[in-house]
Amino acid sequence: MPRSARRFLTIDEAASHMQRSELQDLIDQPNETLTAEYKAWLDLAEPRARASLARHIAALSNGGGGVIVMGFEDDMSVSAPDAARTVAVTRDAISAIAKRYLDPAPQCDVQILTSAAGNTHCVVVVPAHGATPVCAKANGPDIGGKIQGIAQGVFYVRKTGPESAPILTPADWAPVIRRCAMHDRSAILAAVNAALRTGDLTQPQADALKVFAAAARAQFDADAAGANMAEVSERVFQFSYAITREDGEVLDVARLPDIVTEANNEARDRVRSGWTMFYPFTRDPIAPYFATDPGLGDELEFYELKFFREPDPNHVDMWRLAPDGRATMIRAYWEDDVRTTTSLGLKRGEFFSPNMLIQDIGEFVRHAQAIAERFKAPTTISFRCEWQGLSGRQLFHPNTTWLPGSKAQSDARTASGAWPLAAVVDDWPEIVAALAGPVMRAFTSDFRIDANWVRDRSRDWLQM
């Protein structure tokens, strides 16, 4: 592929061409929920506005993470954009507010987006709290003898309404305490991971995971054909995992929607891709639902999302999560998105990005960790990663250098392995490198993905 006459996009520019963002969906289809707060444009020079924003950040973080979307009135009508305020709402400005009012201060991200209707909106992405819940460390302004916006010493959480309100009851505290305990348990497990490392699946683990993945793939192929998009089945990747539990515990199937939302928010501490894996859309007809599959037995109920948008074969997404800890997702390649290929002067199916390969695996491993931590006694996570449609592709990534002529020597590759939860928490770069190895070797023997390379590249994953 000649490169001298072509201007390559940066990673951020290429991502903007994808336009397959859950944040975009939030502004195109506004829907206020416990994880999404909608506000009119805020004047961050005004003390009461800053204090109110800090309260919402604290509540969303203590609720497992979420977003604050600016540019909407209470009735979800669009408020007039204000260029001055758009500039004022920056990552640094939000960080300053969090540090002023909250302890510990969540590290929020800020995105300025344009809706399908052409309106400008700001989205503040709030991460879940860590081992310690977020507490207000300062009062908001005193106006007329009354504290406004936020009160010192109060823990806030999202409540039905939705609203950001103080934690008052044991029921309010229960999910917050559970998340804190999960963080502490992960740290303890990480301390003993050296004695538990393994990379081999037992045959029962491998068989159960393969059956679960195959059933989802059969459904995906049938749905693609039904949507007149059968060709998409030829160029997809499928990642699956299974969580082994010491006591055979299963999750409460009715809680799977909440669990998916929580895990989705937690995974953003490693990757912010613009369209996170296992994203739970909230609007019909693409919102996830409960389903069964004859190939798995009618008694196994799972939570499933199927998204096929004609005629674009890259707007497809399918995932399943079962209460026994098995999960799978199927997606088309980022490298085949028409906006990306057009901007790069390439054709669909012409290149494969090692950078996106490890980012995708890294995000998937993080999601598996988040789900595993919902069980009382998880021991091992088994992974199975499959790629199809590699033939004709060559290694390439915008603004990076890969050896010319590094073309795939096979059309499909599979990687698998099993690791204790402790290793998934502490040594995830090694796991990502191990799972990426087989597909990378399909292209070249001159470069070996290792943990150090994964760790170095992961510094960019939090920039959308």
Image (cartoon, rainbow, N blue to C red):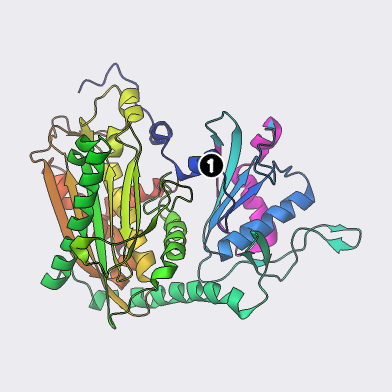
Q: Front-most of 44 and 274?
A: 274
Q: Is residue 369 left or right of residue 198?
A: right
Q: Is residue 233 above or below residue 322?
A: above
Q: Is residue 24 above or below residue 191?
A: above
Quarter of the image where the C terminus is located: top left
Q: Secondary structure at mark 1?
A: loop
Q: Is residue 101 above or below residue 334?
A: below
**In the image, what residue occupies the spot 75% across and 49% down?**
49
Residue 84 counted in the magenta span: yes
Residue 36 counted in the magenta span: no
Q: Residues within 10 Å of mark 1 (few under 14, many from 20)?
A: some
Q: Position of residue 195 (x, y in %)?
A: 24, 78
Residue stretch in magenta: 83-112
The residue furthest top is 5
Q: Quadrant of residue 190?
A: bottom left
Mark 1 highlights which residue? 29
